[in-house]
Image (spheres, rainbow, N blue to C red):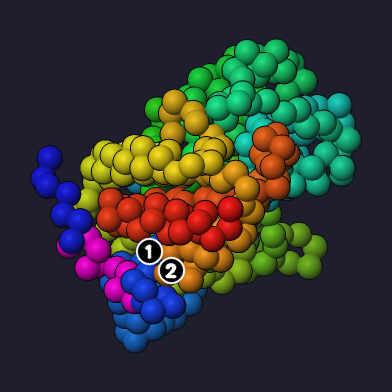
Amino acid sequence: MEKYNIDKIRADFPILKREVNGKPLVYLDNGATTQKPNAVINSIAHYYTDMNSNVHRGVHYLSQISTDAFEVTRKKLQSFINAPEDKQVIITKGTTDSINLVATCYGRAFIHAGDEIIISAMEHHSNIVPWQMLCDEKGCKIRVIPMNDKGELDMDAYQNLINERTKLVAVTYVSNALGTINPVKEIISIAHKHGAVVLIDAAQAVQHIQVDVQDLDVDFLVFSGHKMYGPTGVGVLYGKEDLLNAMPPYQGGGDMIKEVTFEKTTYNELPFKFEAGTPNIEAGICLNEAIDYINSIGLKNIEAYEHELLEYALEKLSQIPGMKFIGTADQKCSVISFIIEGTHPYDVGVILDKLGIAVRTGHHCAQPVMDRFGIPGTIRASLALYNTKEEIDILVAGIQRAVNMLV
Ligand code: PMP
């Protein structure tokens, strides 16, 4: 393995040079969104300077080159997750949009009154609420896989929950609130034995670990561009071809049709059937650079580097008096969630911000996780490929200072 060149990597991200409140920025809110490398930033300017045009429409030159570039991203995404065909990669607005698409299209067509949907106790709200909305509409039921005190799913409970009424299982690959890496391959295999389809929320996974949809045999997989060093407003729904073909369209409009008359409309083929209207062209095209960037370092290298950083952070943070980690799973990546006795997460977050350190505080759009641990929220430091041990040291010193002020 070539040496992980952290100085070069950091130099690729211009925002990391800025100061916040007179201190060098220490950005540890990567679970919310990641910073962008120059390659992505420059490609946005390049798109508007040289290419701007609508896609999949015109015969003119600019429309052709922007369409080609948009489709290059789709191909890049296909190989990024090892999808069999590029038409199985639907370009959406993001993870939330992708889950809503499946809940609406698959749910409305194939899930009925009395059916059950299994989710887990550590889902982001975007993998809870769309299923609740579907259940309200259809009269189906949500069942929840519980977790233990370490923040690991109870697989025996899952085996007991699943039955012939289960039509769909929707589980996160990596928890944004706890950092737990779930045994999704096993979850999928168990679901398939019971004839249920599986949606995996990979919003916190694809930027940290290699995800292979064929190896997982997953039915639907969703993620967001902005959490993987790409632009905001673009994301992915991968689906098995037969399922996507069987599903009705999501929204009606331009691009998703073959022929329209006032009497009848015939729908376009995959992937366009699910891509009504003008997409976020710039974000779609520039996501290509983000994938190239990740590939240029290599996910195996990123995973190894971030794992070492996580271990270092856990060891250093554990020395702070009153520190309580929330989520201590054996299989974990990127996210460190904690509370400190005698302090409120928000107060600690405000003091860290004054020191130029960006963390997230609160429930992280996973209120049921907080309820499970009987707390209102946590402080969350979430790592990316550009973070360093020095930044962890600054975080630890900042927390120590906050504790001295607050306790
Ligand atoms: N699922 C998980 C696990 C997430 O971390 C997030 C973002 N915090 C989402 C879903 C929603 O992603 P987006 O807001 O990009 O749609």
Q: Position of residue 354 (x, y in %)?
A: 48, 71
- Nearer to us in this view, 234 or 385: 385
Residue 195 in the image: above or below residue 207: above
Span colored in magenta:
8-18
Label ID, residue 355 = 2
Q: Is residue 383 left or right of residue 241?
A: left
Q: Residue at x 60, y 61 (%)?
A: 347
The disc label shown at residue 54, or none: none
Q: Can you identify the residue that label 1 sits on?
A: 26
Tell me which residue sits at (24%, 67%) in the image. 12
Q: Is residue 119 left or right of residue 58?
A: right
Residue 127 position in % (x across, y down): 66, 44
Classify residue 214 by image quadrant: top left
Based on the displayed image, in which of its 4 quarters is residue 368 positioned? top right
* Mark toward the viewer: 1 or 2: 2
Residue at image position (31%, 80%) is 46
Residue at mark 1 to residue at mark 2: CA–CA distance: 9 Å
Residue 128 visible, this angle: yes
Q: Amino acid at mark 2?
A: Leu
Contact (CB < 8 A) between labels 1 and 2? yes
